[in-house]
Image: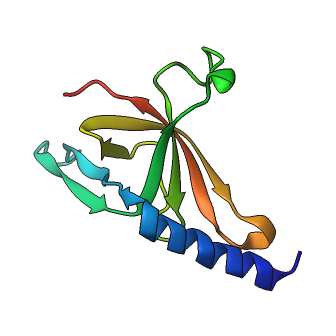
């Protein structure tokens, strides 16, 4: 397939997610801890991103009880807004989710979407 076709697919994926997706709040904390010289505690900073995405349950035939467990969700997330880290947390449908795996769908180097496996997290 040609590069142009993949670029068209990327634009179509972005358009569909913009129309049918929802904002997915992504929270990323950085910093915090103690200054090793002074011993003072530093407050962590939180960044928030809101890419569009679609959240769905995994089909039962994909749930193996090991890598994908009952209750995990599949998130299709728009490409190019934020590069997810496994330490990011997402707040969707009134529940906090942790990231188990992120797969970038990028045929021929053209980023289309991210496929993200989410697992429900305990609230702190």
Residue placed farthest to the left in the image? 40
Seen in the picture, residue 95 relative to 113 is either above or below; the reply is above
Image point (46%, 23%), residue name? 71
Image quarter (top left, top right, bottom left or bottom right) of the C terminus = top left
Residue placed farthest to the top in the image? 65
Q: Quadrant of residue 53?
A: bottom left
The spot of residue 7 in percent (x, y) is 70, 80
Seen in the picture, residue 114 relative to 118 is either above or below; the reply is below
Seen in the picture, residue 5 relative to 61 is either above or below; the reply is below
Q: Quadrant of residue 106?
A: bottom right
Q: Would residue 85 be visible to someone looking at this image?
A: no
Seen from the viewer's position, the closer of residues 78 and 109 is 78
Q: How many marks?
A: 0
The spot of residue 24 in percent (x, y) is 35, 54
Image point (40%, 63%), residue name? 51
Q: Quadrant of residue 2?
A: bottom right
Judge left or right: residue 123 versus residue 10.
left
Seen from the viewer's position, the closer of residues 113 and 36 is 113
Judge left or right: residue 102 versus residue 34.
right
Image point (44%, 70%), residue name? 18
Image quarter (top left, top right, bottom left or bottom right) of the N terminus = bottom right
Q: Would residue 104 be visible to someone looking at this image?
A: yes
Seen from the viewer's position, the closer of residues 122 and 41 is 122
The spot of residue 11 in percent (x, y) is 60, 78
Image point (45%, 45%), residue name? 55
Residue placed farthest to the right in the image? 1
């Amino acid at each position: 397939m040609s590069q142009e076709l993949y670029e068209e697919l990327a634009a179509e994926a972005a358009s569909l997610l913009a129309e049918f997706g929802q904002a997915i709040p992504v929270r990323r904390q950085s910093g915090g801890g103690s200054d090793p010289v002074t011993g003072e505690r530093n407050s962590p900073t939180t960044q928030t991103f809101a890419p569009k995405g679609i959240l769905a349950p995994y089909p039962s035939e994909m749930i193996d009880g090991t890598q994908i467990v009952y209750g995990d969700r599949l998130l299709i997330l728009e490409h190019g807004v934020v590069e997810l880290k496994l330490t990011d947390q997402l707040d969707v449908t009134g529940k906090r989710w942790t990231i188990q795996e992120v797969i970038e769908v990028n045929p021929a180097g053209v980023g289309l979407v991210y496929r993200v496996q989410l697992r429900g997290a305990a609230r702190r």
